[in-house]
Amino acid sequence: MDLTMLRSQFPALAQSNNGYPLCYLDTAATSQKPQQVIDAMNHYYHFDNANVHRAAHLLSARATTQYEAVRDKLCQFIQARRREEIIFTHGTTEAINIVANGLTSQLKLGDLILIDAAAHHANIVPWQELAKRTGAIIKPIPLTTDCRLDSAAFDTLLLEKPAIVALGHVSNVLGTVNPVSNLVAKAKQVGAITLVDGAQAIAHMSVDVQDIDCDFYVFSGHKMYGPTGIGVLYGRFALLDSLSPLMTGGEMIKTVSFSGTEFNQLPNRLEAGTPPIAEVIGLGAAIDFIDAQPKAQVSAAEQTLLIYLQDSLKALGDVVLYGAHSDNLGAVAFNLAAEHHQDVGILLDQQGIAVRCGHHCAMPLMQSLQLNGCCRASIGIYTNKADIDNFITAMQSVKELLL
Ligand SMILES: Cc1ncc(COP(=O)(O)O)c(C=O)c1O
């Protein structure tokens, strides 16, 4: 794998920050975009710009063909059974809201919703709102002291026969990978509906929704080298079809009269209004980009780099790592002794290093770690050893300054 060549496809990486080469270690927040994604979106706006579906003219036909071709690509990319199981959303957040809202009439007072204690707020708050509407009860699935999902506690909670189990595939803070196939299989045995938040998994591993066997799998385009404003909701056809739509209006109907409306079939039924067409096309280009890379080599290289990052931080001394394991993916969470994470982040930025600081939209996880926040360094396909070395050099000088 020629990493120099690969990096050259990401124009944003070839700049400096405060006189230092930009060292982008914030891919978990959003990934940089390869030129082919930028080009695909530009091309659409230059030549094919038209609304999709319905119209009889050339540009609309071209836009519709490209738009629907991405649905086919996604179907293959995550091994869905049929293209109608792929719903375009604006992101992971909207996808989970569609599911949580759509299940309202299927839940009743006292039903139990289990949520991964390390979940992102996007996989917590929509379920809390569902619970408010229905009288359902929410319980977190606790973590072990080494920040993995507590499988024994999960088994015990399953005895209460939850209606819904919402899991993260990979923690956006810690990078911990949940054994989702195993957890989903157990949840299914007690009849629960399962949703897996794949926002942090999709860029780092092959995802096969049939193998995971979950009912819903959701992710965002912008974390997998695609544009912002586009995400995917995969749902098992029958369940997806049973969701009442969150958004209603144009595109999602079959007939409308003032005596009533008949909704369209999937996938249109859950895609009201003009969709983010350029973003869908950009996502298609991101899939082409990922598919063109040697998968096994990429994941081996990312794994080696992540372990190097963890080990280098440990070797610095005075750095506290949270939930660091050798099988984590993509991210390392840390603090420099008792220093405020924001101070560390600002001082790193002065040396060209981009990391993220704060609660990372995972306040319950922060509470269980007894933290106000932490720093997170995260990697992508373009991250190289020099990025890690520059980061560690900068951390050394931050340490000298603050401690
Ligand atoms: C695990 C996880 N879930 C959900 C989200 C929300 O994604 P989006 O803001 O693209 O909707 C994120 C974003 O950071 C995430 O990391």
Image: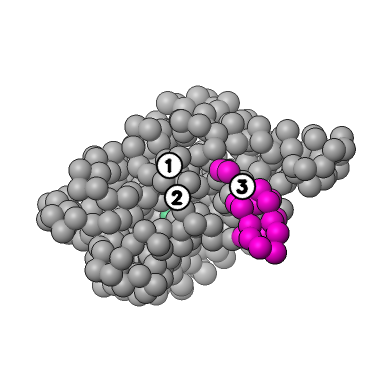
Marks 2 and 3 sit apart, C-alpha to C-alpha, by: 13 Å
Q: Is the residue 40 above or below the residue 23 in the image? A: above
Residue located 52% across and 69% down the image: 346
Q: Which residue is mark 2?
A: 242
Residue 238's tag is 1
Q: Amino acid at mark 3?
A: Asn
| Three-letter amino acid code at the position of disc 2 | Ser
In the displayed structure image, the side of residue 39 where residue 237 appears, left or right: left
Residue 41, percent across and down?
74, 43
| Placement of 161 over or under 189, stated as above or below | below
Residue 378 magenta-drawn?
no
Quadrant housing residue 67: top right
Residue depicted at 40% across the width and 36% down the height: 209
- In three-dimensional space, the C-alpha distance between marks 1 and 2, rounded to whole angstroms, equals 6 Å
Q: Kindly identify which residue carries mark 3.
A: 264
Q: Nearer the viewer, residue 161 or 377?
A: 161
| Tag 2 and tag 3, C-beta contact below 8 Å | no
Amino acid type of the residue tagged 1 in the rendering: Ala
Query: Magenta region: which residues?
Result: 248-267
Q: Residue 291: image x %, image y %?
A: 55, 28
In this picture, residue 186 sits left or right of residue 310: left
Which sits earlier in the primary sequence, circle 3 or circle 1? 1
Q: Secondary structure at mark 1?
A: helix
Residue 319 visible in the current orientation: no
From the viewer's side, name the closer residue of 149 and 33: 149
Q: Check contact, mark 1 vs mark 2: CB within 8 A.
A: yes
Left or right of 399 in this view: 56? right
